[in-house]
Amino acid sequence: MPQSPHDRLAELHNLAAHAHAAAAVAHGKGDHRNGHELSKQAHEHSMNVHKLAEELATKAATSGKA
């Protein structure tokens, strides 16, 4: 069964939140290299959420005008 766009957004938000939390733990333990990598992953997930949300908003606005 295909995943709805809203479910995909929620999944990406959760991935970003998890990566942020894991980065904080790594930084707290002094593991700055892994913390930095996890922070980069969190940023990538957040940017993917933003991009998908914009695409959905544009699609909704376009379909509402038709």
Image (tube, rainbow, N blue to C red):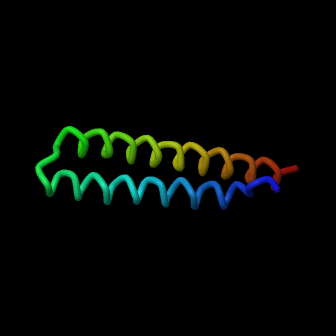
Residue 1 % position (x, y):
82, 56
Residue found at x 68% / y 50%? 56
Give the left or right position of residue 47, taking residue 53 as reference. left
Nearer to the camera, 32 or 17: 32
* Picture mark count: 0
Give the vertical position of 34 relative to 2 (above or below): above
Residue found at x 40% / y 58%? 18
Nearer to the camera, 62 or 16: 16
- Residue at the outermost right position: 66
Give the left or right position of residue 11, taking residue 42 as reference. right
Give the left or right position of residue 56, taking residue 49 as reference. right
Residue found at x 79% / y 53%? 2
Give the left or right position of residue 38, taking residue 4 as reference. left
Residue found at x 33% / y 55%? 20
Residue 47 % position (x, y):
47, 43
- Residue at the outermost left position: 30
Residue 27 % position (x, y):
17, 51
Residue 53 % position (x, y):
60, 51
Nearer to the camera, 58 or 4: 4
